[in-house]
Image: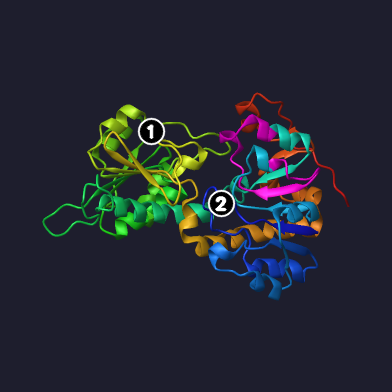
Amino acid sequence: MRIGILKEPNYNEEKRVSLVPAGVQTLVNSGHTVFIETGAGVGSHFSDEDYRNIGGSVVYSAEEVFQRSELVVRITPFNEQEVDSLQEDQILFSALHLAVGKKNTVEKLMKKKITAIAIELIEKDEELPIQQAMSEIAGQLAIQVGERYLGGDHPKSRRILLGGIPGVAPAAVVIIGAGVVGFNAALTAYSRGAHVIVLDKDIRKLRRIRNEISKDIPTVAANQYTIARGVKFADLLIGAVQDKAGKTPHIIPEAMVKSMKPGSVIVDVSVDQGGCVETCRPTTISDPVYVMHNIIHYCVPNMPALVARTASFGLTNACIEYIHDIADNGIANALLGDSGLAKGVCTYNGYVSNEKIADAFSLEFRRLHIFSTN
């Protein structure tokens, strides 16, 4: 199969690359052709020569990648204009987040009969393996960036030390959501001496926090009352709420944000799906924060790009088996053989195959119907 690796766009300052040279090499060794847009790996410190040395074919424009590839791989979700570059019946393997995009984007994918696979929706053993890899990074980074702005890296910050000192209390870190992001944020904050509180509706996830991190971390069943109390208490608030395929609900309204202590910090990791904090809007790596109601908001959708090389290796580790499956067996057989991969398919053969996305835009939903090509 002919596989194309695109350079990530400049508008979101993305530095990751969807496949590192080691991943490309395994595909080449299996007889596949891999086209890499020049400069695709530079942000993660991989040169064009690194890809050439393992048998990759470096090409000099995104247009050439689109025209020569059967399967196109990227990290950044495609916008309405970028979908125009895709070829009829092409396979797209990328983060998509269609539910927070535009209806025209979905309609164009349908019109071109694109098999659009959202990597954030692929499942394995009831988990999201590709999303999990990035969530583990985002959870750790949420505490790092929160600590930075809490401790004085902004004129409005509270200027407090995350872990405190003897005789001076540590910062209160309140985490809404105990999934992969929340778990890693709790682990990182607790290891740095913060006073950590985790809220979630799922008691099983809260139990994991106690059993695998520490029984000293208070865990609280999330509801409107407990969330309001936690938000008001927080020095650093981490939004770690996730909704598969759908748009994240605003469970922290503006009124709750107004109740926070001046100079507190919000890191809304859910912002790539719309955000769980009403006052949050997407920011960029170079301009990551803004102040509203005297609260510092950090809302970078592609936070793992801060550690692009680590994240690129993590993405490759998580993605390569699926790309191999598609390349080795063809898209139809790959989807028939892996129901978890099939759950990532959002559009197929001209229709929407994800019910939440269809509902979000009032489009017809059809269950995925595939025929073997054997």
In the displayed structure image, the side of residue 207 where residue 309 appears, left or right = right
Residue at the outermost left position: 167
Q: Secondary structure at mark 2?
A: loop
Residue 248 in sight from this viewpoint: yes
Give the image location of residue 318, x and y in percent. Answer: 60, 58
Indicate the position of residue 95 as horizontal and vertical percent values: 61, 47
User: Which disc is residue 279 wearing?
Assistant: 1
Q: Nearer the viewer, residue 14 or 91?
A: 14
Figure quadrant of residue 353: top right
- Please give the range of residues in magenta: 83-106
Mark 1, other Cα within 10 Å: few <14 / some 14–19 / many ≥20: many
**Is 77 drawn above or below residue 364 in the view shown?**
below
Amino acid tagged 1: Thr
Which residue occupies 79% across, 52% down? 67
Q: Are marks 2 and 1 in contact (CB under 8 Å)?
A: no
Image side of residue 228 versus residue 345, left or right: left
Q: Is residue 61 magenta?
A: no
The span from disc 2 to disc 1 (Cα, nearest Å) is: 26 Å
Q: Residue at x 46, y 50 (%)?
A: 180
Front residue of 37 and 94? 37
Can residue 136 be seen here? The reply is no
Inspect the image, locate mark 2, and give the three-letter code of the amino acid beneath it.
Asn
Name the residue carrying label 2: 10
Q: Position of residue 213 (x, y in %)?
A: 35, 56
With respect to residue 319, does 297 lie above or below?
above
